[in-house]
Amino acid sequence: MIGRLNHVAIAVPDIQSAAALYQNTLGAEVSEAVPQPDHGVTTVFITLPNTKIELLEPLGEGSPIASFLERNQSGGIHHVCYEVDDIIAARDRLQAEGARVLGDGEPKIGAHGKPVMFLHPKDFCGTLVELEQA
Ligand code: CO
């Protein structure tokens, strides 16, 4: 059911220094930082030949990554994102298997402008999983 790895998301305390690290030290193609107030994060996308890295910095009060960064103060891998052809069909199949979808169970429009949903990390090997409709 799942397809390509769309991105790996890394939560960081300082997105400018993280973007500079990827651009200068690792020599990657790095986007501008984009505030995403609807999602409580600022994002930088790093384009690799076979996938993307998404840097996330908390934005505003109650950011969904704030508690993660309290536990991981120098940053860390926050989630992985897999592509699916049909996000509603994927949700229905996963819920039938007993997996928990976070939030109200309805897809949201993610940082790439496509429908996304998140799956409970306890159901997926301790890893927060994002599904994005390709
Ligand atoms: Co993501």
Image (spheres, grey):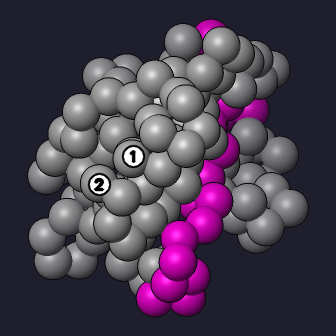
Q: Position of residue 43 (x, y in %)?
A: 31, 44
Three-letter code for the amino acid on which mark 2 is drawn: Gln
Residue 67: image quadrant is bottom left
Residue sitting at 23 percent across and 59 percent down? 40
Residue 125: image quadrant is bottom right
Q: Name the residue that disc number 1 marks.
A: 19
Q: Is mark 1 within 8 Å of ligand 1?
A: no
Alpha carbon distance from label 1 to label 2? 5 Å
Residue 104: image quadrant is bottom left
Three-letter code for the amino acid on which mark 1 is drawn: Ala
Q: Name the residue that disc number 2 marks.
A: 16
3 on left or right of 81 = right
Q: Is residue 43 magenta?
A: no
Badge 2 marks a residue whose secondary structure is: helix
Q: Is residue 28 above or below residue 121?
A: above
Q: Is residue 71 above or below residue 97?
A: below
- Residue 22 seen from this side: yes
Residue sitting at 13 percent across and 52 percent down? 37
Q: Position of residue 34 (x, y in %)?
A: 19, 39
Q: Is residue 71 magenta?
A: yes
Q: Position of residue 121 (x, y in %)?
A: 70, 64
The answer to the question of whether label 1 and label 2 lie on touching residues, with beta carbons closer than 8 A, is yes
Query: Which region is colored magenta?
Result: 70-93
Could you tell me which quadrant the N terminus lies in? Answer: top right
Q: Nearer the viewer, residue 85 or 97?
A: 85
Q: Position of residue 3 (x, y in %)?
A: 75, 17
